[in-house]
Image (tube, rainbow, N blue to C red):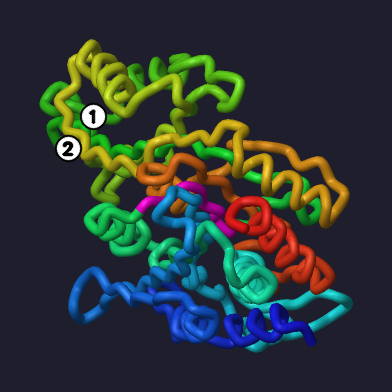
Amino acid sequence: MSDTLRLLEALIARPSVTPEDAGCQALMAERLSAIGFECHTLTFGPADAPVTNLWAIKRGPGHAAGAPTLVFAGHTDVVPTGPLEQWTTPPFTPSHRDGLLYGRGTADMKSSLAAMVAASEEFVKAHPNHQGSIAFLITSDEEGPSVDGTVKVCEWLQARGERLDACIVGEPTSVKSLGDMIKNGRRGSLSGKLKVKGIQGHIAYPHLARNPIHQVAPALAELTTIVWDQGNDHFPPTSWQVSNIHAGTGANNVIPGEVVLDFNFRFSTESTPESLKERLEAVLKAHGLEYTIDWVLGGRPFLTRPGALIEAISAAIADTTGLSTELSTSGGTSDGRFIAQICPQVVEFGPVNASIHKIDEHVAVSAIEPLKDIYRRTLERMVA
């Protein structure tokens, strides 16, 4: 059994359901400390339920002269298992069947974490005097609210004056086979909770009430037809979607006094949160609605254009797998949105994502060592 697979199985065996870390970061820090990393355990959040984060760095002798710092980023927390009886084998017992390794977190994203650590071990052994620096930014708050994890660590790093030059987030980005896709950016996410006020009343006397569902319907219809932007070469057009509508008392003879809509923008770099808010509220005001909106900016869009990092990881993928990788900004958000605020080059790369968050989550065992090799070869091109 390879060191990478051994570490991966040890990480899977720790039930780190968000926001729990369950000792995963301590295990990683032990391995990293042994090869010269300076490790910091950082906790943020409420005292009775703090979020555990890890910052670890090994500075090369060229750091002071401007040699780059490459950061490996990721999360140890995993989503809940779902019904245990539906799993073929227990989700926190690493299990091998037909060339696949099963367990919660195998793909999202403990394979990447194990491969990053093993790659760093191999690289440091082969290049003990590497000029650049290697760092790890690991959280246990990615699958949850994402408020006491990476975003807080980034603030801590800024306060310390740490310089981050490039970052690989170990999200599972591959589609059909390892290396066929990396993410070089993500759309922004802007959510809102719209409350439209009416006047509650008896359904038989509508002239004595004001139905907020009827009032919001024309505005809703108009909002669904708006072209928010055309997107660009890197991003699809901005999308606006309603996810939930709530109204009523439960009785079928009462006009409700309020309707509540949850919605979300997934937006490109052609729009800003400010412009989207302004345009949406202009429609609501034009329809004369009495309303309030609670806005939540989940993250701004980010984009890493071809340069040193993309060239290095693309070449590492080609050398390891023979594939010419595809750059993509599709999919949801990741902690890359926070790191991109303090790091000029951020990409996401990891194993095949077909089974993430599902019952019987798994990775191909044959992909684990190549994943490690891609990370190691990227280090060789960036910081040796």
| Mark 1 residue crowding within 10 angstroms, few (<14) / some (14–19) / many (20+) | many
Disc marking residue 192: none
Amino acid type indicated by mark 2: Gly
User: Can you tell which quarter of the image residue 9 is in?
Assistant: bottom right
Whether residue 286 is visible, yes or no, is yes
Mark 2 vs mark 1: which is more N-terminal? Answer: 1
Compare residues 167 and 190 and report the one nearer the observer. 167
Q: Secondary structure at mark 1?
A: helix
Image vertical order of residue 87 relative to residue 316, above or below: below
- Identified by mark 1, the residue type is Pro
Q: CA distance from mark 2 to mark 1?
A: 7 Å
Residue drawn at the location 73% of the way across and 63% of the way down: 371
When the figure is inspected, residue 149 is found, relative to residue 6, above or below; the finding is: above
Q: Nearer the viewer, residue 201 or 65?
A: 65
Q: Position of residue 201 (x, y in %)?
A: 15, 35
Residue visible at 77% across and 46% down in the picture? 180
Circle number at residue 212: 1
The residue wearing badge 2 is 257
Q: What stretch of residues is rendered in magenta?
A: 163-170
